[in-house]
Image (spheres, rainbow, N blue to C red):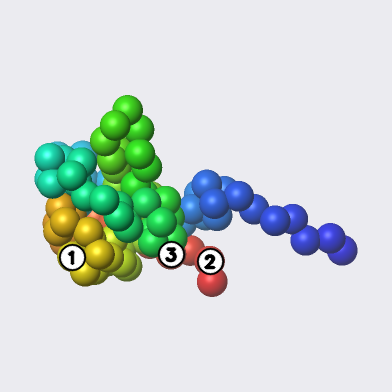
Amino acid sequence: MSTQILSLDARLGIDKYEIDEQNSHITVDHPLCESCENKPCLTVCPAEVYRWVDDEVAVRYENCLECGTCQIACDTGGNSAIDWQPPQGGFGISFRYG
């Protein structure tokens, strides 16, 4: 029996997300972020929520695993431009495997 290696997007697709389209649990202060030299959010997030697109950080908050690593990394190695809060009232991720 062979084991198939899943891409990150395929692995994230196993989980169930309830997205709050009106109020994201992640906010980014883009002017602070743009002036950040290290941009640790681009490398520490296990779900690749943050990507550098068109000279700013694009946030794919719907992929968030709710670990809070981004805020810790931004506060300690960046410009404190990320405000991450747990999703409210039934929104967020439900792990369905593992």
Q: Secondary structure at mark 3?
A: loop
Q: Quick one: which residue is furthest to the front in this view?
A: 37
Q: Which mark is residue 75?
A: 1
The numbered mark, 1 or 2, whose residue comes first in the sequence reads 1
Q: Position of residue 21 (x, y in %)?
A: 21, 39
Q: Position of residue 59 (x, y in %)?
A: 29, 42
Q: Which residue position holds label 2?
A: 97
Residue shown at the point (16%, 56%) measured from the top left: 79
Q: Secondary structure at mark 2?
A: loop
In this picture, residue 88 sits left or right of residue 2: left
> In front here: 56 or 26?
56
Q: Secondary structure at mark 1?
A: helix
Tell whether label 2 touches label 3 (CB within 8 Å): yes
> In front here: 21 or 55?
55
The numbered mark, 1 or 3, whose residue comes first in the sequence reads 1
Residue shown at the point (48%, 63%) measured from the top left: 96
Q: Quick one: which residue is furthest to the top in this view?
A: 54
Is 34 situated above or below 98? above
Is 31 situated above or below 93? above
Instruction: Assign the C terminus to one quadrant of the image.
Output: bottom right
